Amino acid sequence: MQTNIVLNRLKYFFSSFIKNFNTSNKKCTYCGSQTYEVIVKKFFVTKLVRCNNCKFMFRIPTTNFEESNKYYQDEYSGGGQDLIEDKKNFTVDFPEEFKNINPKLINFKNTDKDYSKYILILSKIKKKISTKKLKLFDYGCSWGYGSYQLKQAGYDVTSYEISKSRSNFAESKLGIKIISNLNNVEQETFDFFFSAHVLEHLPEPKKSLDFALSIIKKNNYLVIFTPNGSFERKKKDFYRWNKAWGLIHPNLIDEKFYKNIFSKQQYFITSNFDEDFLFLENFLAKSENYCGKLDGEEILIIVKKVS
């Protein structure tokens, strides 16, 4: 596995060098603008930039949909940005200790795929919507570990995953309802759009966020978690912040981008989930925009669709 990871990185280095000569690989992957400011450079051939138009932070050279799809079908072997993280990553490589266990019997508590924190946040919002079983769309479910826990928590879960091997596992082994064609999803039929650590991977993030807003009912919610690209995080721990973008994560998400694209909706943004629970209650009650402390590893945005 480690040999494959090294080879992937060498391939990434040389392809990035070549792609830098093509201006089409320097357009914002969210809005298409070609004006940007450079935030930081890495390995002489890649740089993280912020679009001057939409405020999205993305890697140059960029990756198109075809390249991304091939990578996730054939080559994706780890979720970190270095060899140690890749080797231990649980999201993309089925863990050895679970290979001889019925997946439905796995106790995810205190593992890398424990969704207790996410389920707790969803439950806070759920109380404001309905006591009935709510429909949740899990965008980018990987092997389905998270979708399974959300289903066990009482949600009517429909999931989407681009990787055929992972979506097949989720459907056949965990009984997850998988959608393979997003065009078949009816508009305004879901109570929640949920996504955990997916947006940072996407070659066409605008399409995904437009889709998210289209499928949830008015006055219901998007709940999205990604690595935290905020400059508060950068100042606190530059090493870990800088590790959050590169080969595997061509995008780095922060509050500036979220505030810009969701300016017509209502939003709650934080990276400090424990301290900001009180403010979450206020947001749900009054629907007043809130942006909390942003120096943690993950950034959460909750968007209430109002238009």
Image (tube, grey):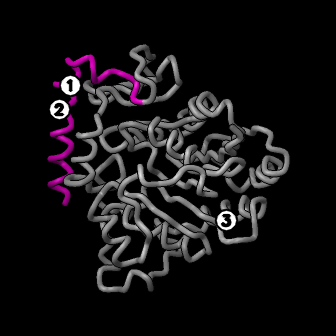
**Callout 1 environment at 10 Å: few (<14), some (14 to 19), or many (20+)?**
some
Q: Are marks 3 and 2 in contact (CB under 8 Å)?
A: no
Residue under label 3: 120
Lower sequence index among marks 3 and 2 = 2
**Res 127 → quadrant:** bottom right
Q: Are marks 2 and 1 in contact (CB under 8 Å)?
A: yes
Name which residue lies at 76% across and 55% down.
277
Q: Position of residue 108 (x, y in %)?
A: 49, 75
Residue under label 1: 19
146 drawn magenta: no
Towards the viewer: 133 or 222: 133
Vertical relation: 181 (above or below) 213 = below
At numbered mark 3, what does the secondary structure look like: helix, strand or loop? helix
Name which residue lies at 64% across and 66% down.
134
**Callout 3 environment at 10 Å: few (<14), some (14 to 19), or many (20+)?**
few
Towards the viewer: 163 or 211: 211
